[in-house]
Structure formats: C-alpha cells, structure tokens
Image (cartoon, helix red, strand yellow):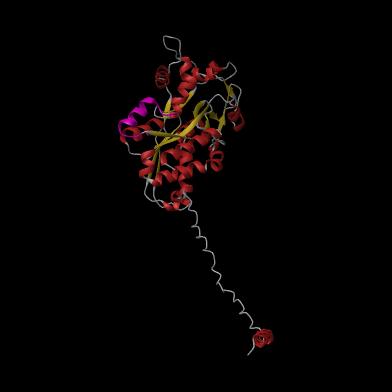
Amino acid sequence: MTKTVRSLLFVVVALSLVLAACGTPATEAPVATEAVVEATEAPAEPTAAPTEDPMAMYAPDAVEGDIITAGSSTVFPVTERMAELFQQEGYTGNITVDSIGTGAGFERFCVAGESDISNASRAIKDSEKEACVAIGREPLEFRVGTDALAVVVSAENDFATNLTKEQLGKIYTGEFTTWDQVDASFPAETILVYSPGSDSGTFDYFVEAVVAPLTPNADGKADTKLGEEALLALEGAQFSEDDNVLVQGVEGSPYAIGYFGYAYFVENSGALKALSIEGVEPSQEAVDAGDYPLARPLFIYSTASIMQEKPQVAAFIYFYLNNLEDNIVDIGYFPAPAADLQGAMDAWTAGTGN
C-alpha cells in the first residue's frame, strides 16, 4: 500500500472516530447528589435554674425555734405587733415579748445573756456595751421608730393645756407641789405625780431632757445622776414599769400628771389629755419638723452571732424592719428618718453576712 493510500485511510478512520463520538449520546454527568446533612440543632441553651430568692430562707414559714425579746415598755407595742404578724405569716415557734423596762432589758441581754433581742427607748450606754462584750456579745443597733413622749393629765382636768419644760421639771423635782404654784390661775390642789420607774428608758430620757437641767453639778452643767436622785426622792410620787398602771393612776384624778410613750396616750385618749410642751402638741407634723421638744428614738438590739446561730431571730428582725412603715403610725409612734431605717437594714445585712 502506497504511502498516499495509508495516509488517506488514517484520515478516514480518524474522521469516523470523531463522528462516532459526536453521534453517541453524551453520557449525562452524574447529578451531584447534595449531601443530605441532617440539620443538627444547635445545642439548646441550658435552662437557667430559677433564680432563688436569697431572702427565702428568712421567710416566717421557713424558720423554726423560739425567740426571746425583752426590754422597753415603750417599744413593747411595736415588737408585740410584729410578733403577731410574723406568726400570722407562718412562723410556728414561740416569741416571748417581755415588758420590763429598757435598763432591765439590757441587764437580761448583756449580763445574763438570756434574750435574743433587747427593746430600748434609748441608745445603749457604754457600760451596757462593755457588759455585752464581756459575755461575747457585740450589740447591733436597729432604729425602729420615733416616740413623742406624751405628758398627760386626766380628761377631767379643765385647767392645764400647756407647760414649759422648766415648769414640768419643777413639778418633777418637787419645787412645785400644788397646781397654783405652776400657774396662779390653776387650783390650789396637790399635784399627784406619776412616773415610770428607774429601769425604764422613758425615765432615763425624761431625767435627761427635763429634770437634769434643773439639777446642775458643781460646774453648773445638767447632771443626770442628781436629776435621777431628785426624781426618785420626790415625796408622794408613784413609780411603775407598767405604763398601764400609770394610765390608770393619771386618769383617776383631775390633779394627777404623768408621762409615757405616745402610743399609750393614743390607746387611752378618751380618758387622758396630752399637754402641749413649749406650746407644741405631740403630732406627726411636729415630730417630723423637729419642733416637739420631747421626741426620742426607739431601738431594738441583737448581735451578728445571735442572728447567724439562730436564723429565726434574723428572720424576725428582717420582717420587723420591712413592716414598720405599714404599722408604726397605727401603733401610735412615728417613723424614723429614712436614712436611719436604711442604716438599720444595712446593720442587718452586715450582721447576717448577706
């Protein structure tokens, strides 16, 4: 076969192959199968556990064990009300509320170490703090309200409406023994004097505010010790730690006079009349304005160690502080300044470690 023929044949064969390739249906490229990826859900956020109320452990129905309080007869109505409400909210333990006077209350709290809470109508004295520390107790102070000390006479007294602090002091030091010595227009009748006893914080406050200015020491300064001695030596004066006894004594004669916490006057206002002092009547407005001259703070005391060892005591104080606003006025006292109430709550927080 000649070279020319071979070349021609090669071309024909090559062309045949090309035509065959073009005529053969193209094999479809396999359809790319999408990888079926199961949608894997993103891991669910872990369900947040319900936020626990850190105060739940101090709910009245969450604590058990007994609580012992003792002290001021003035603070007694407040603590008694709070104890009743605390029990109504589910507390099933026993709460003892003894009205024995502020001084006796601190004796039981700081010396005997028998009470969990001390009710006081005055601030704790340095000597009482020292007694507390001596038995391992560091007192924590909680301001709970304000009292306007009520100076009262019988509702049948139709002559006295206002006294100055000086006139009142002279009655309680024995310088004035008949009403006409107080004011010439008053009857010449013997003044029947009633007073809380010396264990009472009300007594202490009255001596400091009213009597001591009339019993100066050698330096001419008001002396509370001399004032206390003068009042306790007052001939014919009747003393009692029980304010209800004082109420009964004063209401029994138009010539009697006494003093105690405003709440007891409110409770017995039908039988008693509160005198203005320095021309100012005891009232919310006068106390808030700082005008009433015989207003004083009210307290309860406990310790951090007591509250931590006895959750029921911490729970009761927490409840007490949080329910003052709704009850203090109804009881017959006045709210403490907001800053003092916040200070009391801060003391609770520090004492419980919350």
Direction from residue 32 to residue 246 in the image, left or right: left
| Residue 158 placement (x, y as % from top left) | 60, 27
Q: Which residues are magenta?
A: 123-137
| Residue 73 placement (x, y as % from top left) | 44, 35
Residue at position x 52%, y 60% in the image = 45
| Residue 9 placement (x, y as % from top left) | 66, 88
**Placement of the C terminus among the 4 image quadrants:** top left
Residue at position x 37%, y 29% in the image = 129
Main secondary structure of the magenta stretch:
helix
Magenta stretch encompasses residue 341? no
Residue 73 visible here: no
Q: Nearer the viewer, residue 168 or 81?
A: 81
| Residue 246 placement (x, y as % from top left) | 46, 32
Q: Is residue 235 above or below residue 339?
A: above
Q: Nearer the viewer, residue 171 or 136?
A: 136
Q: Nearer the viewer, residue 95 or 16?
A: 16
Q: Nearer the viewer, residue 212 or 14?
A: 14
